[in-house]
Amino acid sequence: MKNHLVIYNTLTRTKEKFEPLNEGMVGLYVCGPTVYSDVHLGNCRTFISFDLIYRYLLHSGFKVRYVRNITDAGHLEGDRDEGDDKFEKKAKLEQLEPMEIVQKYTLGFHDVMREFNALPPSIEPTATGHICEQIEMVKQIISNGYAYEVNGTVYFDVEKYNKEFPYGQLTNRQLDDLIANTRELSGQDEKRGRLDFALWIKVKPEQIMRWPSPWGWGFPGWHIECSAMSSKYLGDTFDIHGGGMDLQATHHTNEIAQSQACNHKAPVKYWMHTNMLTVNGVRMSKTAGNGFLPGELFTGDHPLLEKGYSPMGVRFFMMQTHYRSTLDFSNEALQASEKGYARLMASIKTLENLKASARSTSDIKEIEKNCYDAMNDDFNTPILIANLFEASRIINSVNDNKETITGEDIISLKKLMHEFVFDVLGLKTETSNTASDKALQGVMEIILEIRKEIKARKDFAASDKLRDDLSKNNIIIKDTKDGSVWTIQE
Ligand SMILES: [Zn+2]
């Protein structure tokens, strides 16, 4: 297996040649959703980006174990052990059991991922299903001397850890700098250091989600679940850990500290982070009021949206920006992508009926090489797509008799388009089911039948006029030896 893949590693802030720990195998862990509300679009971007990465690793011949967790316990509102538990709060609001909240939003999350054609991970472990593993890990960290218990809650001792390991390495920050930027401890705080974080949290009397532990009834801190589950399924050190870049400073920094303190090994070789979403140039957030949900994006039911956009159109739109760049949503950009996606799909259809010639006027091998070079360069999808558009331009030119192609190159082009468009980019043909699309389909069948009869009567002037009139309305008729076909020109 040839492997020329280069990955940008957040840990070293450089692009590095990808060398898996075990030849031919990849362990990939991605922080999954906290299932207390509908999954938001920023999270979808992260999961779709890692779906692409997973797909390309599989396409490159690696055996991949892809673990993406479900956070269904222990996530407080504040990043630093403050605020209410997200599940308990939502359960009260919706008058449901916390686990009913978990079930409802887990199913909703899976539905959205299916709509976006994201492959399911190999393992999707839940925090509540791994309480024992988390308790064991906390016990080990205490016995290694990096954590302490106060009144039923266990905290990680960041300053002690930092004496031996650089705590701020993932964001390239010094401890003093981090401390200076963190709120001072009040008299009521139990923790010793400002940056210390909870590994296990004592339960409040009214709380439903609770488990017994050596420190009394409680629940795990948010960060410990990922350390416990990643090492359980991928080992103490594994290849790739991914997530949104908003997780870098706290969640992932703490994951590294916990795993290192427990196992005396750096947990991850390559850290990968996806960038944020903006809407018309403004960061998407609840407070800015510019956050729409995937469902709203599909139906167009939001004041910022001019219309609904199909899941594949949105997926294609996301792929046109590199995962490490900000992705800006606007109606113009989404509509441009929709057209591009339709153009690409139309050319794949055209490819099926292409005529072979004695020689090719274009270098198909060169395009194939460019596609692999783009993906091997830290999964550069915008450059990949530019090359696929070049392939689709060639297909259309050959179809219009402006260029020629050999039978062998047609086979290579089919393989190239199918593998990159369907297997790697994860796009699929969308069958349109709207009433107007069905009506148009019916009308066009009638028109083509009438035109066939006109031609049979040898009234070529009338049949050409019909074709030209339709063309003025962007409906292109093409006569093939198997009959006439029609497409809409975008
Ligand atoms: Zn995580």
Image (cartoon, grey):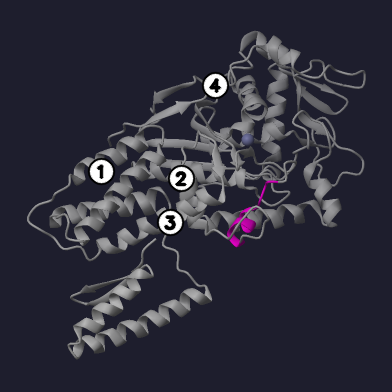
The span from disc 4 to disc 1 (Cα, nearest Å) is 37 Å
Of helix, strand and loop, which one carries label 4?
loop
Mark 3 or mark 4, which is nearer to you? Answer: 3
- Circle 3 sits on which residue? 339
Q: Identify which amino acid the numbered label 4 is placed on.
A: Ala
Q: Which comes before the other along the chain, label 2 or label 1? A: 2
- Circle 1 sits on which residue? 368
- Circle 2 sits on which residue? 319
Q: Are marks 3 and 1 in contact (CB under 8 Å)?
A: no
Whether the residue carrying mark 4 lies under 8 Å from ligand 1 is answered with no
- In this rendering, the answer to whether 462 lies above or below 224 is below
Q: Quadrant of residue 267?
A: top right
- Circle 4 sits on which residue? 266
State which region is magenta. Answer: 290-299
Q: Which comes before the other along the chain, label 3 or label 1? A: 3
Most extreme residue toward the bottom is 457
Residue 9, magenta (yes or no): no
- In this rendering, the answer to whether 191 lies above or below 99 is above
Horizontal placement of 296 versus 53: left or right? right
Q: Which comes before the other along the chain, label 2 or label 3? A: 2
Residue 251 percent across, percent down from the top left: 66, 30
Q: Identify which amino acid the numbered label 3 is placed on.
A: Lys
The span from disc 4 to disc 2 (Cα, nearest Å) is 31 Å
